[in-house]
Structure formats: C-alpha cells, structure tokens
Amino acid sequence: MISKKIIYLFLLLLTSFYTFSQDKSNNESAKQKFTLSGTISDNNSNETLIGVNVSIPELKTGVITNEYGFYSITLPKGIYKIQITSIGFQTTEGTVNLDKNTKMNFKLTGSENVLKEVIINSNDSQTENRKPEMGVNKLSVATIKKMPVVLGEVDIIKSILLLPGVTNAGEAASGFNVRGGGADQNLILMDEASIFNSSHVFGFFSIFNPDAVKDIKLYKGGIPARYGGRASSVLDIYQKDGNSNDFHMSGGIGLITSRLLAEGPIVKNKGSFLIAGRASYAHLFLKLSEDQKDNAAYFYDLNAKLSYKLTPNNNLYMSGYFGRDVFAINKSFTNIYGNTTFNTRWNHLFSEKLFSNLSAIFSDYYYGLDLDFVGFEWRSGIKNFNIKYDFRSYVSDKLKLNFGVNGIYYEFNPGTIKPSSPDSGINPDQLEKKYAYEPAIYINAEQKITDRIDINYGLRYSLFYNVGSSTVNLYENDNPVLFNSQFQIYEKATPIGTKQYSKNEVIKSFDYLEPRLSVNYQLNENQSFQASYNRMVQYLQLISNTSSPTPLDVWTPSGTYIKPQIADQVALGYFRKFKEGAYSTEVSGFYKEVQNRLDYIDGANLIANKAIEQVLLNGQLRSYGLELMLKKNEGKLTGWISYTLSKSEQQTPGRTPEETGINNGQWYNTAYDKVNNLAVTGSYYLNPKWAFGANFIYQTGQPTTYPNGQYEYLGMTIPIYGLRNKERLPSFNHLDISATLTPKPNYNKNWRSEWVFSIYNVYNRKNAASIAFRENLDTGTNEAVKTSIFGIVPAVSYNFKF
C-alpha cells in the first residue's frame, strides 16, 4: 500500500505551494499590481498560437502563451508598451494603461502576407535563453517543410533526427532514440493522446500529417512534471484547430502519396472544423505487373478536429486520428496495423490568473496478421482511457504554478489466434489479456528568483496497479529464469502452480515520487548557463529484441516479475547569442541511468509467449554524452549544425556469483549506441520564386553481433555468435537536397502553389541496414551479404492552398 509518509509529504508540498501563492497574491495587492491577460491568435484563421512571447521591454519581463494561446502576467500599476513576437509572424506592439485587471487579445499577421524581405528570421528552433527549459527543441511545420526528405514526403520524425542527441536505427526504421535511450522510452503525444507506433510502412513515413500539425516540441531533459510514463523523452504534438474566419483547402500531390486538408468556420469567429486525409498509392503500380497484382503496401490516415468557443471563458475541442497500414503478399499474407485516438477537451478560465483544461482521451493501437497459407488470424494491441485535469495559475510575474491529476486505464491484448477457414488445423487461442491503472498527481513551479536566476521545479507522484482478471504463474523462490551452471546458459523455470486474480483485484502495485528541476543562470543578455535533473518512471514495457520497433512488438505492464524502469538524468548546458541573435550556439552534456531495463536470455522466443517472464532478465542502462548546436538564425541562408558525441551501454550482471549474466556481466553497447552523430541542415532563400534546402547526416554504424565461428551438424553449417553488439555496421551517411519553386509568388491571391523537387541520397550511398552471413552455394565459402534500403531517390511534389 502507499506509504502514509509519502502522502503526507506530498500534501505538505501542495499546502506549501498554496500558502506561498496566497502570500504572493496578498503582497501584490498591497503593492497595487494588476493582471494583464488574454489570448493570441492568427489574424487570418483565428487559430490560437502556442509559445508566443509577450514581453514588457520597460520591465525586462514577459510570458509565453500556453498550449491554447492564453497568457497572463501581473505587473505594477502603470502605462506599458507591449511587444508580441513569434516566429513566422510580424512583430506586434501595443500600449496598455494597467490601472485594473485588463484583458487584451492580440491577432498576429503571418509573415507570408507580405513579400519576403532579404533579411529573414526563420529559425524557430532557437532557444529562448531566459526560460529554464533545458534540453527542449521546438520546430515549426514551416521549417520542416523546407527540409528535403525521402520520397518527397515531409516527415516530422525524420526532421527531429537533425537535432542533437536524436538518432534512429537507420533508413526505413521506425521510431527514434533520444540521448541513448530506446525507442520505447519516448512518450509520443498527439493532442495529448498516446501514440504507440509512430510509423507508416514499417518506418518509411511517420503518421503525422504535416498539414494538420500546429506545434511540435521535443523534451530531451528538464521534462516538466506534467509528463510521465516514459524514461527517455517526450514528443508533444498539437493539431491545428481549424480556420474560424473563412473556408480554405490545401494539399499536395506526390509520386508516392497525396494529401488534402479542408478547414472552415462552423459559426464565424466562434467555431471551426478541420479534416485532413492522406494516402499512399504506390501499390497501384504493382497491379501493372502480372506477378505482383495480388501484392499491396500502402497506408492511409485521417485527422479531424472541431473547436468551439462556448463563452469568452469556455472553449470546447474534439479531435481524432485514424490510420491504417496494409501490407499483403499474394493474398496469403496480410498485415494491417495502426492507431486510433479521440480526445475531448474543455478549457475554462476561472479568472485572469487561473486557467484549466479537462481532457477525456482514448487511444488504441491495433495489430492484425492473416496467414492464409497457415490458416490462422492473429490480433493484438493496446488500448488506454485517460482522464486528466490540468491547471495553470499565474500567481505573479515571478511565479507560475502548474498542477493537475490524471488517471489512465490500460487494456493489453498480447494475442488472439483464430482459424481463418473451417478446414484450418489451427485451434482458437487467446493469450491472457492484462489490465492496469496508472493514476498520477503533479505540481510544478516556474519561478524567477532574481534578475539572473530562473528555476523550474516540480514533483510528480505516480502510481501503478497491475490488476485482474488474470492468472499468474508461481515459481520456486519466485524465480522464473534459472541458470544452468553445467552448460553456462539460462533456462526457463517450470511453474510450480498458478494464482488466479479476479477482475480489478490488485496483482502488484508500485508508487514513486518523480522530482524535476531546471535552473537557468543569466550571465548577461547574450549568455546563460543551465542545469537540470529529472526522474522518470516507466511502467509499460515493450517486449522486443529488435533495435527498431515493429508492428508486432507487444507492450506489457509492470507486474509480479517485471519491474518499472526508473530513469535519472542530469544535464549541464551553455547558451550564447552572437550579433544580436543572428547566430547562436548551445552546448550541453548529459548523464542518464535507467534501472530495470529488460534484457533477454539467449534464444528467447518473444512471440505468442504465454510466460514471457521465463525469458526476461533485469538489467540497467547508462548513457552519457556531449551535444553541440550552432545555428544561423537570420539572412538568406539559415540552418544549423548539430553534433553529438555519446555512449549508450547496457549491463545485465549475474544474480549470483556463479551466474554469467549477459556478455559475462560486462557493459555492452545497446543496439542504438551511436558514438558520433553529425547533422547539417540549411535553407537558402534566393528570391520570391526559388528556395533551396540541404541535409547531411553522418552516424557511427549501428552495433550488431557477428558470428565468430561455426560447426557442422547433420550436414548443416551452424554459426557461433560472439558477444552481443560487439561489432558494428559500416558508418551511415547521406546528403539530400531540395528546390522549391513558387511560380507566381503573390501571397495575397486566392490560389497559391509550389513545386518541390528533391533528391534523397545524392551520391547514392548504399547504407547497410543489416549484414547477413551465409554459405555461397557455388564456391562453398562463407560470405557476408549487405542489405540496403535506399540508393538515390529523386522525387517531385506539387503543393497548393486556396
């Protein structure tokens, strides 16, 4: 059960925050302070804007808008000049006579509504060095669309790979790795809904339609207390609300995919809708070939959102996503998988200082596999239902509080097997479903201590209950994995019995405090130092021994034999601007440790395993590194250079002196260890008609395991493999370029269009996705065979908006 001391400590912290807030409020009243608040939106669409800077130059203070475009700041009585700035919009200024609590809404004009000038400020990844947000990167869709990508499809996941500390498992690989962590350790949110597989076509594309996305933020460290449930990072994505002024459509036609978005008012200036669809059609070309006409490989997805202003203080949002991938071979093999999410949110403004958001969220990841030649159907997936209530209190210009609660209910289906025809020899089977609850409460403060010191500190208290109905195997000494000292191998233990748990009966419970702290020290207007510490607890485990997530990967809850992952990360950083912000640089170092990282015994069978605990071992992970980012923020040429020098290792020692553990109990490279990671990206604005972009990526080769010997058995040659991940694939690198042509660059006309020409992997490098070893049937000698996904890939797409 939960410790009473922990509950008392948490309640004491909440009480302290509340008392401090009240004292601050009383003091401010005595000093004749008033609150300026409001909402900032796009002048063209009424779309609320996230992360807009609202500054008071006279007082050298300011605030940024939250996820719903709301801002609030408390100032002494007086007349002030207000400056509103946001990347991609013209700077707006105003004046306020603050002699009472005042509400002022602002509408910003997009920079595309005027002819582009020679001097451009378009690098939206620039860090605001006054905010203690260490390890946070923000990218806009406008920036991402300038980057050349494979097959001409703009891709959010591939774009964040250009940031320091972010890698993946190679070309056409699903997911991404942050600061040496696994892809399963990233919390991916779309309109607050969890995404369990972020890829289409096994990693060729991501599920995020860039036309429907408003804001993208990646947290690598210094993660706010409102986030939890993953051990490595948070990718937070918000969809557009829709245009409540006028009806508009936009889209694009490419060689592989096409997309279309429609948005417009439900009630002018009060309500809006947005619906966006995207689909690939490369499989249609397969139909032209007689031997390929029964094959298919395609995806489709749909984004939808409704927004409505009920009253000046109440807003309602409903958003959803539905996506599916279909892969089929000769009607004998069919694979369908994808995500479904739905979210209803209610924003309420209690006062000019207290903003709230109540969300009800549903998320479902589905996986289906039909094997007609075997005669069975396989279904698996994970569902969750999440209720969360978040508050943001603008106590003063020096203190802001975030606090809230949430509760998640999980349903895990590890596998359902059914015969696909009456004459099938397969017997129906259902791997036992699993259920869990994950409630949490948090409080977080952003506080300005002095003119030079800002801190962001908080505490999250998370709980996890693995519940029935379920049957749990019992083992001697509670040990499902045995070590055979004679053969020096791990073996499955035989259950000595089972224990049945009824519906919602608690099988195993956990609770943890997760402290978070970020500090920013402002040396002067151009330089700052930052430090952060955060603890994250991950209760869900991905059962997979591949370096990149696949659709068949199975999630399972922590329980009797599987412990939660506990991650502790510290980081230090330095930020500096040059030439009034035209250039900037960021340097940071990090060290991360993760307890209870799953490892697998040799020969582990993970698919349809009814006793998965028999092949799992508890290990630990550590990663550390140095990140550097140099950016050019203004001028015709903008972009950045990022470099990461890092190490990611795992250790699974023996549990007793006689056990060998994995790799003799020594630290070994994780499958996502990339010692060197260099990324260069740039955009060049030539004139209103032509713009150019280029990316270059270099990474150390991915760790792998090669055979170091062989033996013959019954006429077959059997390889003997060495230590795990001791060797590496060849280094990975490629250069991509693009050119964007705007035939008639009149930004005030109704129809606007552009052509995007791109070449992926210009010099046609054959990067190794894997290296297999086999016996050459002609010569009888062993040979290594490299598998590559892409060579040079030219593409063209046509984008339009009206």
Image (tube, rainbow, N blue to C red):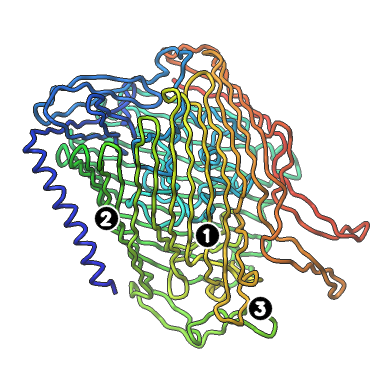
Q: Give the vertical position of 188 relative to 553 (above or below).
A: above
Q: CA distance from mark 1 to mark 3?
A: 25 Å
Q: Position of residue 691 (x, y in %)?
A: 56, 19
196 relative to 295 in the view: left or right: left
Q: Give the vertical position of 759 relative to 765 (above or below).
A: above
Mark in front: 1 vs 3 = 1
Specify whether residue 360 is in view.
Answer: yes
309 relative to 725 in the view: left or right: left
* Image disc number at residue 405: 2
Screen quadrant of the C terminus: top left
Mark in front: 2 vs 1 = 1
Residue at the (15%, 42%) spot, across then down:
350
Mark 2–mark 1 CB contact (< 8 Å): no
User: Of residues 797 and 422, which is closer to you in this image?
Assistant: 797
Mark 1–mark 3 CB contact (< 8 Å): no
Q: Position of residue 650 (x, y in %)?
A: 57, 63
Q: CA distance from mark 2 to mark 1?
A: 31 Å
Tell me which corner region of the image, top left, top right, bottom left or bottom right, holds residue 712: bottom right
* Image disc number at residue 489: 3
Q: Give the vertical position of 105 relative to 729 (above or below).
A: above
Which label's residue is closer to the chain start, 2 or 1? 2
Mark 2, Cα crowd under 10 Å, few <14 / some 14-19 / many 20+, is some
Tell me which corner region of the image, top left, top right, bottom left or bottom right, holds residue 217: top left
Label 1 is placed on what type of residue? Arg
